[in-house]
């Protein structure tokens, strides 16, 4: 289940990736959000913050996919540096927090609440 469709991504969020890429990556983004919100999003009434978060994470996944971890490359003496996966994970989680920290579920708890 995607938390937003391509029409929302293109027209409301202002995204620019091709629809074929969006369809694949938005499923991954939605699964990431669902996992971190512990399946507390009412899929019959998805908040715009969740839709925007899905769009933003989808864009970040596209950048990560394009980069494939490579951050720099040199020709003389041949050096290649790769970004740590933990940096990608931190970027995705920070995006999740930026969009969803204040969003509540139907019981009035933060979608990101993990219990005590």
Image: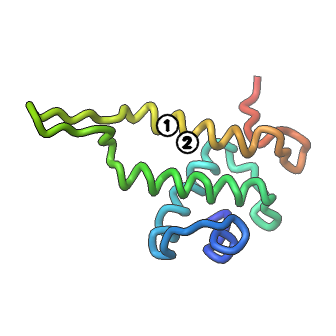
What colour scheme governs how the chains and residues are painted in the rendered image of this protein?
rainbow
State the SS at label 1.
Answer: helix
Residue carrying label 1: 89
Mark 1–mark 2 distance (CA, rounded to whole Å): 5 Å
The residue at the point 81 percent across, 58 percent down is: 47
Q: Quadrant of the C terminus?
A: top right
Q: Can you say whether 50 is above or below 75 in the image?
A: below
Q: Quadrant of residue 107?
A: top right
The residue at the point 61 percent across, 54 percent down is: 56
Instruction: Assess disc 1: are there few (<14), some (14-19) or many (≥20) residues with their C-alpha within 10 Å of its C-alpha.
Output: few
Q: Tell me residue 45's x, y (percent).
A: 82, 64
State the SS at label 2.
Answer: helix
Q: Tell me residue 34's x, y (percent).
A: 64, 50
Q: Quadrant of residue 72?
A: top left
Residue carrying label 2: 92
Q: Tell me residue 29's x, y (percent).
A: 56, 55
Along the line of sight, the residue nearer the viewer: 28 or 20: 20
- Count the marks: 2
The residue at the point 73 percent across, 45 percent down is: 99
Residue 1 appears anywhere in the view? no
Question: From the viewer's perspective, is 48 left or right of 3?
Answer: right
Q: Are marks 1 and 2 in contact (CB under 8 Å)?
A: yes
Q: Can you say whether 26 is above or below 94 in the image?
A: below
Question: From the viewer's perspective, is 20 left or right of 47?
Answer: left
Instruction: Assess disc 2: are there few (<14), some (14-19) or many (≥20) residues with their C-alpha within 10 Å of its C-alpha.
Output: many
| Residue occupying the far right of the picture | 108
Question: From the viewer's perspective, is 22 left or right of 37?
Answer: left
The residue at the point 77 percent across, 38 percent down is: 101
| Residue occupying the far top of the picture | 116
Q: Tell me residue 84's x, y (percent).
A: 37, 32
Q: Quadrant of the N terminus?
A: bottom right
């Amino acid at each position: 289940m995607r938390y937003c469709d391509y029409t929302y991504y293109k027209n409301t969020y202002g995204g620019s990736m091709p629809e074929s890429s969006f369809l694949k990556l938005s499923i991954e983004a939605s699964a990431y959000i669902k996992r971190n919100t512990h399946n507390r999003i009412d899929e019959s009434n998805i908040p715009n913050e969740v839709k925007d978060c899905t769009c933003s994470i989808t864009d970040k996944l596209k950048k990560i996919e394009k980069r494939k971890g490579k951050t720099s490359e040199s020709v003389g003496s041949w050096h290649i540096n790769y970004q740590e996966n933990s940096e990608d994970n931190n970027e995705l989680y920070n995006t999740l927090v930026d969009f969803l920290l204040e969003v509540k579920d139907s019981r009035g708890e933060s979608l990101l609440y993990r219990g005590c």
